């Protein structure tokens, strides 16, 4: 187990000899053991260090273990902290209930059985470690989800921009088709009108030509007929240009 994987275990007892014995028993766990000789010192360690398990002696001169556990539980950071009581006196059922009310998770009687104490501390230390690992995994998962969500949002925004661009292109193409249809309709109308006017003008030119042959002895009438023929020819030329437009021919 690397140093970064170790958890801190706080040992609280007013007797240095008992602290040494707890340290000797728990050293096999490979965790970081933090010792406190009083309740005040224990609270200082708790506020400065992340503690996984607290081993508290029930009987201490300044504050007993129950009072210290109550103070620890009052702090929002330590609502789930594992607290194990060590009691050298006979613990009654009322004492057990009192301890559990103050946040104890387990009791160890004195004389302490080393294997029993190690197993109890090991369970809660491992639970703390797994909980922290799970929190780290959840944080990483949330980070990845947020990152992926941002990527999807960007992809959706890009897709929306592309759809809008294609929509504008489609609308422009559709408008162009409509304009072409309008031009086509106009061309058909123009061709029909030009064709009808051209037939009328051909009839007029034919009749004016015949009239000119019979008016050779009247110069004034001949001038009028020639002027009308020229005007009709200009009209015929205009209808040819209209037909060329309708047929999409080059206009000269």
Image (cartoon, rainbow, N blue to C red):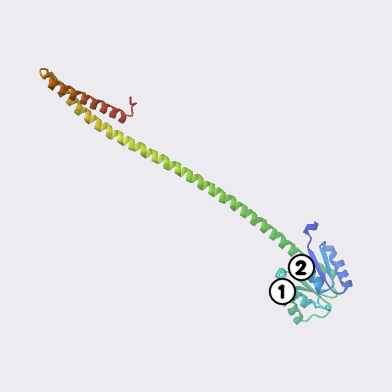
Which residue in the rendered view is the most extreme toward the front? Answer: 220
In the rendered view, does 133 fall on the left or right side of 189? Answer: right
> Residue at horizontal 42%, vertical 43%?
171
In the rendered view, does 229 fall on the left or right side of 110? Answer: left
First reached walking from the N terminus: tag 1 or tag 2: 2
SS at mark 1 in the image: helix
The answer to which quarter of the image holds residue 42 is: bottom right
Residue 213 vs residue 29, the one in the foreground:
213
The answer to which quarter of the image holds residue 72 is: bottom right
Which residue in the rendered view is the most extreme toward the top? Answer: 217
What's the mark number on residue 88? none
What percent of the width, then of the height, locates residue 186? Answer: 30, 35
Residue at mark 1: 74
Q: Give the distance between the C-alpha atoms of the residues marked 1 and 2, in whole angstroms.
A: 13 Å
Residue at mark 2: 47
Instruction: Using the image, determine if residue 194 lies above or below residue 77.
Output: above
SS at mark 2 in the image: helix
Residue 225 vs residue 163, the one in the foreground:
225
Residue 8 vs residue 117, the one in the foreground:
8
> Residue at horizontal 19%, vertical 28%?
200
Q: Are marks 1 and 2 in contact (CB under 8 Å)?
A: no
């Amino acid at each position: 187990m690397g140093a970064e994987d170790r958890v801190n275990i706080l040992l609280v007892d007013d007797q240095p000899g008992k602290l040494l014995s707890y340290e000797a028993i728990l050293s096999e766990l490979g965790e970081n053991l933090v010792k406190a000789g009083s309740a005040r010192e224990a609270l200082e360690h708790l506020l400065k260090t992340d503690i996984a398990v607290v081993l508290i002696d029930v009987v201490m001169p300044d504050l007993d273990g129950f009072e210290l556990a109550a103070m620890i539980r009052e702090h929002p950071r330590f609502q789930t902290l594992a607290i194990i009581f060590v009691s050298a006196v006979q613990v009654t059922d009322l004492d057990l209930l009192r301890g559990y009310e103050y946040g104890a998770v387990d009791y160890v009687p004195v004389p302490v059985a080393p294997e029993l104490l190690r197993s109890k501390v090991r369970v809660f230390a491992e639970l703390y470690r797994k909980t922290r690992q799970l929190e780290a995994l959840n944080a990483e998962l949330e980070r990845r989800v947020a990152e992926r969500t941002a990527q999807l949002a960007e992809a959706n925004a890009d897709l929306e921009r592309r759809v809008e661009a294609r929509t504008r292109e489609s609308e422009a193409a559709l408008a162009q088709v409509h304009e072409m249809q309008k031009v086509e309709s106009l061309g058909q109308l123009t061709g029909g009108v030009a064709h009808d006017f051209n037939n009328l003008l051909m009839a007029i030119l034919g009749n004016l030509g015949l009239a000119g042959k019979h008016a050779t002895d009247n110069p004034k009438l001949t001038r009028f007929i020639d002027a009308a023929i020229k005007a009709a020819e200009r009209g015929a030329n205009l209808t040819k240009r209209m037909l060329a437009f309708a047929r999409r021919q080059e206009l000269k």
